[in-house]
Image: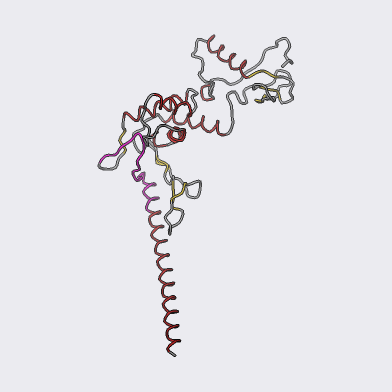
Amino acid sequence: MQVWSCIKSVCDGEMLLTILSAFAQEESRNISERVKKGLRMRAENGEARWSRIYGYTKDDEEKYIIVEKEAAVIRRIFDEYEKGMQPTEIARRLNQDGVHSPAGLGWKIVNVKYILTNHKYAGNILTNARITENHMTHKQVKNTGQVERIPIKDHHKAIVPQEQFDRVQKIVEMKRTGQYPFMGLMTCPICGRTMRKVRPSGNDYYWACEDDRFYISVDKVEDAVIRAFEVKGKEPPLGMEFWQFDGMIDEITFGPHYGLTDR
């Protein structure tokens, strides 16, 4: 009888712990949901929590205040990338010039890419960049579409103009997807079909007809475009990046030259 009483006491104790644990988990979940709802309401009202970022400091009200010395570096990064410089080269030049990095450990490619794609430098905030994966562990993970990201426009003073930020995002995306300058602007002078960029094995890049009836080297096209700008008395584009031709060139055509079908 005494043994049975002990077993019953242990079982009752374990059951109570299970029930209390379940209540605790549910309360933790409810708190997490209330916090998320509160943050969402703040974002919809144009409010966001302060977070430390290179280029800004804060005042007593946690408003973003530009740090001009760091802002000059950020503007330099945007300008150099826009002119065709790769993040690797930008980081190398910053280190060479003795410019202090955000972490003080030297500039790396990841630092440059982070700055180039951060909406805060255009004065905006995109909320929910990172989210709590689990209300029990409170582990933070990158938001890749699990939760809606709410944009807050003109939240604070910008370091780079919105127009420049948008151009840089276009360059970043086109490089990510493998697009090139003049894509869709050239048609074959023989068959009239759109030309594509190709690289025959062991050779340089060419623009080629879809029927492989006409080839022209990329260098020749770029040289011709620069000469055309020089003839018009305009500044020739630097780096041959796409944004420098966006809205400037509608079409590239080829005249009736001798040996047109030759590669």
Say whether residue 53 is magenta. yes
50 over 93 or under it: above or below:
below
Count of labels shown?
Answer: 0
Q: Residue extending furthest left?
A: 60
Q: Is 223 placed above or below 241 here?
A: above
Q: Indicate the quadrant containing the N terminus: top left, top right, bottom left or bottom right.
A: bottom left
Colour convention of the picture: secondary structure
Residue situated in front as seen by the camera: 217 or 128: 217
Residue 64 location (% of width, % of height): 32, 38
Name the residue: 44% across, 86% down.
3
Question: Residue 12 is drawn in which quadrant?
Answer: bottom left
Q: Is residue 239 magenta?
A: no
**Which residue is at 50% across, 46% downward?**
144
x and y, in percent, of residue 83 in the image: 48, 22
Q: Is residue 89 left or right of residue 156?
A: right
- Judged from this view, the residue extending furthest toward the bottom is 1
**Residue 193 in picture, x, y percent from top left:** 70, 24
**The image quarter in which residue 115 lies:** top left
> Can you give x and y, in whole percent of width and height, for residue 253 in the image?
64, 17
6 in relation to 70, above or below: below
Q: Residue at x 44, y 45 (%)?
A: 129
* Quarter residue 153 falls in: top left
The residue that appears at 41% across and 82% down in the rendered structure is 9
Q: Which residues, given as a range, are shown in magenta?
A: 38-59
Q: Quadrant of the C terminus?
A: top right
